[in-house]
Image (cartoon, rainbow, N blue to C red):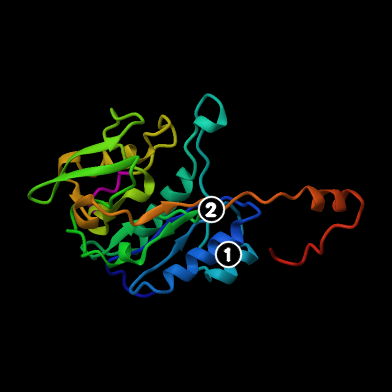
Amino acid sequence: MTPLSPPQPPLLPPPPRPVQKAELVRLSQTLLHVRALHWVVVEDAAAPTALRGALHPPERRDPPRASPPPRGPPWLRPRGVEQRNRALQWLRETRAPGESGVVYFADDDNTYSLRLFEEHPWRGRLAGGAGGGPAFRAAAGGGGRVVGFHTAWKPERPFPLDMAGFAVGLPLLLARPAARFDPQAERGYLESSLLGGLVSPAELEPKADNCTQVLVWHTRTEKPKLRQEEQLQREGRGSDPHIEV
């Protein structure tokens, strides 16, 4: 394993879906241009899958520990919680106290500017606001601090940030071993459940030109229409299942 040094590593909980390979290929080819990066992928599987194994040879893969699901309809439940917590556990088990680095939680259906990974290293103790879009962004003031948030949806949240809108210093994660994502968190509060165990909003360090630049876009790949393939399968003439798509 190569030493972790800023910026690194994206933690990724990708669910299986028809566009998964396309999104993982796109993300992996972006990350190929980033120096000193370690990509941690946590699978929803008891054993490695061929697709992700080919893209990212595994060092260690364990199934996530299940937690009681929150009450209510599935769309209210936070996704990727156990996967992200498993990655945090892996970091705490394998990284030495005082080791430098930055942890960023990436999604495979986002598009990332390489400028995001060229930001100056975060101070090791602080979580960093990484900017946002017109509908959401951190508002930075003088002296390198975040003074508020520009968001219309649940602005009362302690940290009204999207998962792609912040990064955390590795030393801070190692120093606060109890900090984790809460699988019972209310919708929209998943990010706050982790950050609340690490810092206060006043301790956030603005990045992306004082939170004035957009460096991440949520460009979810369009869901493919597979009606004709499903019809062929019903007729016993489906596509070769050994061809990886």
Q: Position of residue 92 (x, y in %)?
A: 33, 57
Magenta-drawn stretch contains 231: no
Confirm whether residue 41 shows in the render: yes
- The secondary structure type at the circle numbered 1 is helix
Type of the residue with mark 1: Arg
Closer-to-camera residue (89/244): 244
Q: Position of residue 1 (x, y in %)?
A: 39, 74
Q: Position of residue 33 (x, y in %)?
A: 40, 74
Q: In the image as oriented, which residue stretches furthest toward the top?
A: 72
Closer-to-camera residue (25/39): 25
Residue at (30%, 44%) from the top-left corner? 178
Residue 40's place in the image compared with 134, above or below, is: below
Query: Which residue is under mark 2?
Result: 14
Q: Main secondary structure of the magenta part?
A: loop
Closer-to-camera residue (67/224): 224
Residue 100's place in the image compared with 168, above or below, is: below
Q: N-terminal of the two: label 2 or label 1?
A: 2
Residue 65's place in the image compared with 242, above or below, is: above
User: Is 231 displayed left or right of 17 in the figure?
Assistant: right
Judge the density around disc 2: few (<14), some (14-19), many (≥20) Cα neighbours within 10 Å.
Answer: many
Task: Give the magenta part as a residue range.
Answer: 175-179
Distance from the alpha carbon under mark 2 to that under mark 1? 10 Å
**CB contact under 8 Å: marks 2 and 1:** yes
Q: Position of residue 54 (x, y in %)?
A: 59, 71
Confirm whether residue 69 shows in the render: no
Residue at (44%, 58%) from the top-left corner? 111
Residue at (60%, 55%) from the top-left corner? 46
- The secondary structure type at the circle numbered 2 is loop
Query: Which residue is under mark 1?
Result: 52
Q: In the image as oriented, which residue stretches furthest toward the left?
A: 143
Residue 40's place in the image compared with 191, above or below, is: below
